[in-house]
Amino acid sequence: MTQRSILCALFLVLVQLLPAQTIFYQYAFSTEPFTTLTSPTVLPLTVWDTDGILPIGFAFKLGNKILDSVDVSPYEGSLFANYDFSEGDTLQGIFAYNTEAGLAFKAGARIAYKTEGAAPNRILKVEWFKVGLETGTGEVSFQIWLYETSNKIQVKLGAQTVPNPASTFYNQVSPLIGLGLNIVPSFGENLLIGYSHWVEGTPQAPTDTILYNKVYNGAPLQGCTGVPLENSVFTFTPGNSSGLHPAPVVETLQFSPNPATAVVYFAEPLQHATVEIVDMLGRTVLSQVLSTGSQQLDLPAGLTTGTYLLRRIQDGKVAVGKLLVK
């Protein structure tokens, strides 16, 4: 998995429909001196090609999952919950320093981790130290902390040298920092994040924004108005927040006939929707935009007998159904 993963190949799975989730996090910004980890476990260089599974050392709740380990994505500056394709999991992610071009290993850089403290107040600390930028010169240091019992998440920034933000970041000025929970496997150019909580505003006083069921066409563009400052600390603490109304992540797609041979008909007319057919290996066999008012989808010629995922993306909502082809 690489970036190369989160916005593309990670999402090659069969998705089962999930009920509404109530996932609230409270946000806080503070500053404190950045301290590099002492005597941590350093990950091998091969992690840049394969990612790595890190033991947390305690039970940690992220989104709708209880974790005992996390998947570190060095290139993306992110941690993800392991998930089971066959069980239809959605993905839970923590984005500490996600960039458009990606991060790069360089001489003197390391990715390391350690769990400190005593139960029930242990902390997993994961550090990217003096990692480079794929855009060329420059380097950044940062950490993600996961807290036992409170399930609090902190992103801590160290020294940063970013000579060319315009070619480094999605929004051309700052990295993507925050949470993406209930990320639904996506095909084509679309990505649905059921609950996203991002850092934005000025580097001196960053604020936050919360989005539900956001369909991203390409890369998310949330971020600050400039490169966040050294010693910045972004904290996300689980807890109810007033005025937030979670929504279902996915809807059930109604169509017939099923099994089908050459054509399917949707129960309701579509409104300039994107329709996708994906096989059980995660390969997209059809991605098509249907005109407004259309209710008919012609299946691709030569589509082999079997089970497929039929998916509709329309008006920021996603509906999914299992298609049987005979």
Image: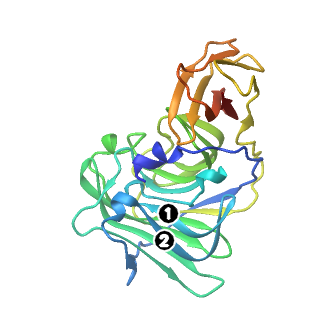
Look at the numbered discs 1 and 2 and tell me whether their residues touch, using CB distance below 8 Å.
yes
Q: Nearer the viewer, residue 311 or 167?
A: 311
Q: Residue at x 64, y 31 (%)?
A: 310
Q: Secondary structure at mark 2?
A: strand
Residue 150 at least partly seen = yes
Structural crowding at the residue carrying mark 2, measured as other residues with C-alpha within 10 Å and reported as few (<14), some (14–19) or many (≥20): some
Q: Nearer the viewer, residue 248 or 169?
A: 248
Q: Residue at x 59, y 35 (%)?
A: 215
**Residue 4 located left or right of residue 311:** left
> Looking at the picture, does residue 14 appear above or below residue 29?
above
The amino acid type of the residue labelled 2 equals: Leu
The residue where tag 2 is placed is 54
Q: Horizontal and vertical percent for residue 73?
A: 43, 59
The residue where tag 1 is placed is 71
Q: How many marks?
A: 2
The amino acid type of the residue labelled 1 equals: Asp
